[in-house]
Amino acid sequence: MGVHYLSPRPKNSHKGDFGHVLVVGGDYGMAGSCRLAGEAALRTGAGLVSVATRPEHAYAMAGSCPELMCHGIVRVGDLDPLLERATVIVFGTGLGQGVWAKALFNHVIQTELPLILDADGLSILATKPLQKSNWVLTPHPGEAGKLLDCSATEIQRDRTLAIKKLQMQYEGVVVLKGSGTLVLGPSGELETCKAGNPAMATAGMGDVLTGVIAGLVAQKMLLEQAAFTGVCLHATAGDKAAYGYERGLMARDLIPYLNVLL
C-alpha cells in the first residue's frame, strides 16, 4: 500500500474543511489521555477537536489547552449533540471499564461514524465481540490477547498470525502495536512500521497515536491509509523526540514534531 500524502491546502481553506474529531474518554484520574489524543489530532491537521469527558475534567482541560472544545458528560444522551457534529470518533482513551464507560460504549458503537478504538474501549469490546467495517482497532499485545482470549506471550510468539486473526474476527483495520508495529485492513496487505525506539515504551504513547490517526481520517484519508501513515508519523516523531536516547521520553514530547513532519 503506497502511503497517501496529504495534498497542499487551498489558500481559501477554513477549519470546517478538515474534519471534526470527537475524543470520548477520561474517567476520574485519567483526563490526560484525552488531552494527549485531542492535541495530537490538532497537530496532525484536524480542523476541530471536541473532548467528551467527566465534567470535572472538562473545566481543567479547557484551561490547559484552549484549542480543545471540552464537554462534561454525565448521561449518555449528553453525547448526542457532539456525535451529530463529529467526523470521526476516538473512543477508549482513559475511559475506565465501569458503568459510565460501558454505557458510553454501547451508545457510541451504534454510530456509523469512523471510530478509532483504543485502550479501555478494546477491553470492553473483548467482553462483547462484534464486527464493524469502519473502525480502526489499536491494541498492544495485552489488549490483543484479551480480544483473542489468549495471553500476550502467545500474541508476541506470532504477531503476523495474531493480527490476521484479529482482522478476521473484528473486521475493519487493526494496528498491532509494539516493536515493528503491524497494520492490516480489508486490502489484505500487511504493513510493518520500521521506525520507533525503546524510549517510546511509556504511558500515553497510544493516546497520541489514536489522535494522529483520527486527525488523518478527519482530513478524508481512508482508514487503512490513515492507520499506516499515522503509525509511521507517530513512530518517526518518537525517533525525532528521543534524540537517540532510550529513557526519559514523554508522550507529549512527540506532539511538536507532528506538524513539522507532515
Image (spheres, rainbow, N blue to C red):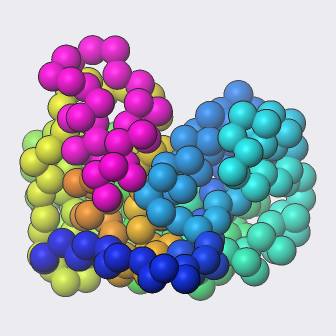
Q: In this view, does 209 lie to the left or right of 101?
A: left
- Residue 237: where, in percent of width, then height? 28, 42
Q: Quadrant of the N terminus?
A: bottom left
Q: Reply above or below: 120 against 107.
A: above
Residue 198 is drawn in which quadrant? top left
Residue in the picture at 34% in, 22% down: 249
Image quarter of the C terminus: bottom left
Q: Where is residue 38 in the image (x, y as percent from the top left)?
A: 59, 51
**Residue positioned 54% across, 56% down in the render:** 42
Provide the major secondary structure of the magenta segment: helix
Q: Nearer the viewer, residue 237 or 209?
A: 237
Residue 30: percent from left, percent from top: 65, 33
Question: Can you tell which quarter of the image residue 94 is in?
Answer: top right
Q: Is residue 146 left or right of residue 189?
A: right
Residue 116 forms part of the magenta stretch: no
> Taking 55 as reference, is 97 left or right?
left
Q: What x and y, as percent, mark residue 193?
A: 15, 53
Instruction: Give the tally of numbered discs.
Output: 0
In front here: 1 or 8? 8
Q: Nearer the viewer, residue 171 or 146?
A: 171
Q: Can residue 162 be seen in this view?
A: no
Q: Give the range drawn in magenta.
A: 234-262
Q: Give yes or no for residue 255 being in the magenta stretch.
A: yes
Residue appearing at x 75%, y 80% in the figure: 84
Regarding residue 183, the answer to whether it shows in the image is yes
Q: Residue furthest front?
A: 11
Is the residue 105 above or below the residue 232 in the image?
below
Q: Residue at x 56, y 47 (%)?
A: 39
